[in-house]
Amino acid sequence: MTHDAVLYFSKTWGALYLAVVFCLAALWIYWPSRKPIYDAAAVSPLSDEEIER
């Protein structure tokens, strides 16, 4: 393989790979069933409760 072929492959399939990973991460974060987890994390710095370790 020449340098140009490797560069072409990494630019096309690498960009597609990163786009798919981004879409999957966005779906994971914005999935409706995960909302309570993020709501609890959003108010946790404001609570006076001790953090259990």
Image (tube, rainbow, N blue to C red):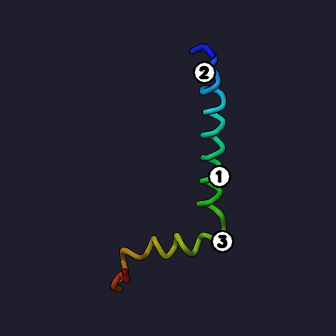
Quadrant assignment, res 53: bottom left
Q: Residue at x 54, y 73 (%)?
A: 37
Q: Which residue is label 3 attached to?
A: 33
Disc 1 marks a residue whose amino acid type is Leu
- Whether residues under marks 2 and 3 lie with C-beta atoms below 8 angstroms apart, the answer is no
Which mark is drawn over residue 6?
Answer: 2
Examine the rendered structure and indicate whether residue 16 appears above or below residue 34: above
Q: Which residue is mark 1?
A: 24
User: Residue at point 35% right, 86% down?
Assistant: 49
The N terminus - image quarter: top right
Q: Is residue 12 above or below residue 24?
A: above
The three-letter code of the residue at mark 3 reads: Ser
Query: In front: mark 2 or mark 3?
Result: 2
The residue carrying pointer 2 sits among few (fewer than 14), some (14 to 19) or many (20 or more) residues within 10 Å by Cα, namely few
Q: Nearer the viewer, residue 31 or 4?
A: 4
Q: Amino acid at mark 2?
A: Val
Give SS at disc 1.
Answer: helix
Q: Is residue 48 above or below residue 38?
A: below
Q: Nearer the viewer, mark 1 or mark 2?
A: 2
Number of marks in picture = 3
The percent coordinates of residue 50 (x first, y second) are 33, 85
Q: Residue at x 65, y 64 (%)?
A: 31
